[in-house]
Amino acid sequence: MVRDGYKFAMPPLVLGLTALAFGWRWSGAILFLLGAFVVYFFRDPERKIPSDPSAVVSPADGRVMEVVDEELGGRRGRRISIFLAIWNVHVNRAPAAGRIERVEYRRGRFYAAMRSRASIENEQNVIYLATERGEIVFKQIAGWVARRVVCWKRPAETVRIGERIGLIRFGSRMDLWLPEGVEIAVAPGEHVAGGSSVVARWK
């Protein structure tokens, strides 16, 4: 389980066990189940990272919502948007090996993560990753339920492909922008696993 999860899981678990000890079965059962769900939500399974040097992996678990052409800073590229349902693993991973150039926290709204405007208007962390083949940009985007985006990395840190880089608490969205010269390997509707599913390859 992710370390952040203990402070959310322990109170309902302790209160639930205390309630059961006093014979308050329904209250105890509800609190204990709530705590068990929080433990499940903050799970952090190991992943098999692809060894293909041309691979770009998914930064998050979830369902691909869209793959669209999109310019970023005057550069042409494509954006892959992934929706994380509340039952998905919410630990985020680096899509490629490289150096964190910038991490920009942007305040914003909390539209439902499936809406296109969430990519621009919702609260988010924008992470710029310099790789040997070009810059990749990915966003941790808060949603209607998710109200906290957490990045564990700082500028100038290096990361390995598939390395854990942060967490989004509860249902949310992850956008991955890739420059021209990358061949997209997923389509809308597909389910991906962070760190192990190949979503694109450098040509």
Image (tube, helix red, strand yellow):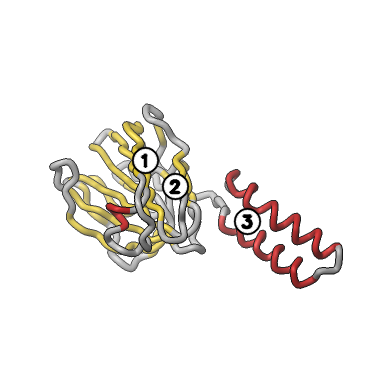
Q: CA distance from mark 1 to mark 3?
A: 27 Å
- List the residue tagged with mark 1: 105
Asked which secondary structure carries label 3, the reply is helix
At 14% from the left edge and 47% from the top edge, which residue is drawn?
Answer: 76
| Quarter of the image where one finds residue 156 | top left
Q: Mark 2 and mark 1 in contact? Answer it, CB < 8 Å.
A: yes
Q: Mark 2 and mark 3 in contact? Answer it, CB < 8 Å.
A: no
- List the residue tagged with mark 2: 149
Total tally of numbered discs in the picture: 3
Q: Which circle, 2 or 3, is nearer the viewer?
A: 2
Q: CA distance from mark 2 to mark 3?
A: 18 Å
Q: Which dot marks residue 39?
A: 3
Q: Earlier in the sequence, mark 2 or mark 1?
A: 1
**Residue occupying the far top of the picture:** 156
| Quarter of the image where one finds residue 157 | top left
183 above or below 154?
Answer: below
Q: Which dot marks residue 27?
A: none
Q: Earlier in the sequence, mark 2 or mark 3?
A: 3
Asked which secondary structure carries label 2, the reply is strand
Q: Amino acid at mark 3?
A: Val
Task: Give how far across and how far down residue 45 sits, in percent.
Answer: 55, 52
Task: Give how far across and how far down residue 143 sits, in percent.
Answer: 40, 58
Pointer 3 local density, CA inside 10 Å: few below 14, some 14–19, many at least 20: some
| Quarter of the image where one finds residue 37 | bottom right
Q: Amino acid at mark 2?
A: Val
